Amino acid sequence: MKKLILFAIITSTFSVFNPLKAKTNTPIAVENNTRKEYAEGWKKGYCEGWKDVKGKHAICPATPHTPVPEMGKKSYQDGYNRGFKAGIKAAKR
């Protein structure tokens, strides 16, 4: 009988607190969008940096994989700036 009462208390406790779990997916979606924007900025910046050294009519090489953004720098512009510097460095080699 004690086991039955204990089982009832435990199951009711879990059923009461189960709906309190936060189920938010929006931060993940926002993070994915910022990574995508950063990657787009990286690709565009890399190409523009390459053209800055080789000339405006130069054909852009294959863009290397997008690096992991630095802390606090996740926007399109941050990716563009970092890609631009990397493109210049690669074109000078």
Image (cartoon, rainbow, N blue to C red):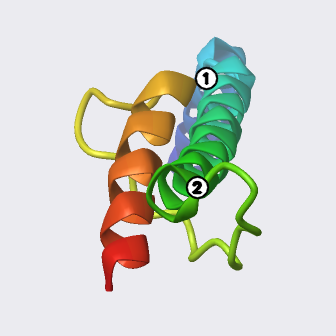
Identify which residue is drawn at 62% across, 56% down: 47
Number of the label disc, if any, that sits on residue 8: none
Question: How many numbered discs?
Answer: 2
Badge 1 density bin: few <14, some 14–19, many ≥20, Cα 10 Å: few
Q: Earlier in the sequence, mark 2 or mark 1?
A: 1
Which residue does the numbered mark 2 point to in the structure image? 51
Which residue does the numbered mark 1 point to in the structure image? 27
Q: Are marks 2 and 1 in contact (CB under 8 Å)?
A: no
Which residue appears farthest toward the left when viewing the image?
71
Residue 1 visible somewhere in the drawing:
no
Q: Secondary structure at mark 1?
A: helix
Residue 48: % across, % down:
58, 47
In depth, the one of 3 and 17 nearer the eye is 17
Residue 24: % across, % down:
69, 20
Identify which residue is drawn at 58% across, 55% down: 51
Residue 35: % across, % down:
60, 41
Considering only vertical position in the picture, is 91 above or below 9?
A: below
Residue 82: % across, % down:
36, 46
Residue 64 visible somewhere in the drawing:
yes
Which residue appears farthest toward the bottom when viewing the image?
93
- The quarter of the picture where residue 46 lies is bottom right
Considering only vertical position in the picture, is 5 above or below 62?
A: above
- The quarter of the picture where residue 20 lies is top right
Considering only vertical position in the picture, is 51 above or below 89?
A: above
Label 2 to label 1: alpha-carbon separation: 36 Å
Identify which residue is drawn at 32% across, 75% down: 92
